Amino acid sequence: MKKIISTILLIGFLSGCDFEVPGADEQFGTQNFVSAVSIIELHKLRNGVYPKRLKDLEFLGDWDGIWLSAVRYEQNGDGYNLYLERGWTGKPSLEFPVKFKQGLGIRESNVTWSATK
């Protein structure tokens, strides 16, 4: 009975807490975006074409569902559009160096591409 009461109190305490961590949206957003690009590009390397949908990706790990739910993907001709929808809890604004997308099939994105970063 003590364990049940302790658990209820702990859950009540945690539900009132704000779990925002400064920079977490950017960190998780970056990881989500980079993971998505990696597995999408691996699919292209293995199959010769980009997937029509993210559901077409093969050989996903248990944790890949995290980034799958955090991005929006659209096949775009011989490339793709990739939009970051979520970081940790919100939607971060990310900036990557232009060199990051060199040789990739990214056509459109809500990521900012910077020549100076």
Image (cartoon, grey):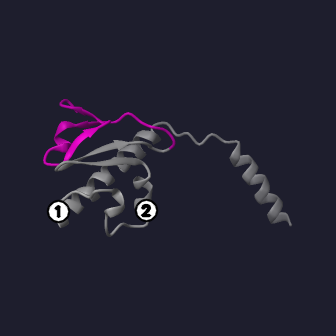
Q: Residues within 10 Å of mark 2 (few under 14, many from 20)?
A: few
Q: Is residue 79 left or right of residue 71?
A: left
Marks 1 and 2, the one that precedes in the sequence: 1
Q: Quadrant of residue 16?
A: top right
Q: Position of residue 28 (x, y in %)?
A: 42, 46
The residue beneath circle 1 is: 45
User: In percent of the image, x 27 and y 52: which residue is there?
Assistant: 37
Q: Residues within 10 Å of mark 1 (few under 14, many from 20)?
A: few
The residue beneath circle 2 is: 63
- Vertical relation: 56 (above or below) 35: below
Q: Which residue occupies the extreme bottom position in the image?
A: 59
Quadrant in which the C terminus appears: top left
User: In percent of the image, x 32 and y 63: which residue is there?
Assistant: 56
- Vertical relation: 87 (above or below) 9: above
Q: Amino acid at mark 2?
A: Trp
Q: Position of residue 66 (x, y in %)?
A: 44, 55
User: In percent of the image, x 40 and y 60: which residue is there?
Assistant: 64
Q: Position of residue 55 (x, y in %)?
A: 36, 61
Q: Amino acid at mark 1?
A: Leu
Q: Start and end of the magenta stretch? A: 89-117
Q: Quadrant of residue 60?
A: bottom left
Looking at the picture, tell me which residue is in the foreground, 7 or 62: 62
Q: Position of residue 75 (x, y in %)?
A: 26, 50
User: In percent of the image, x 76 and y 59: which residue is there?
Assistant: 7
Q: Secondary structure at mark 2?
A: loop
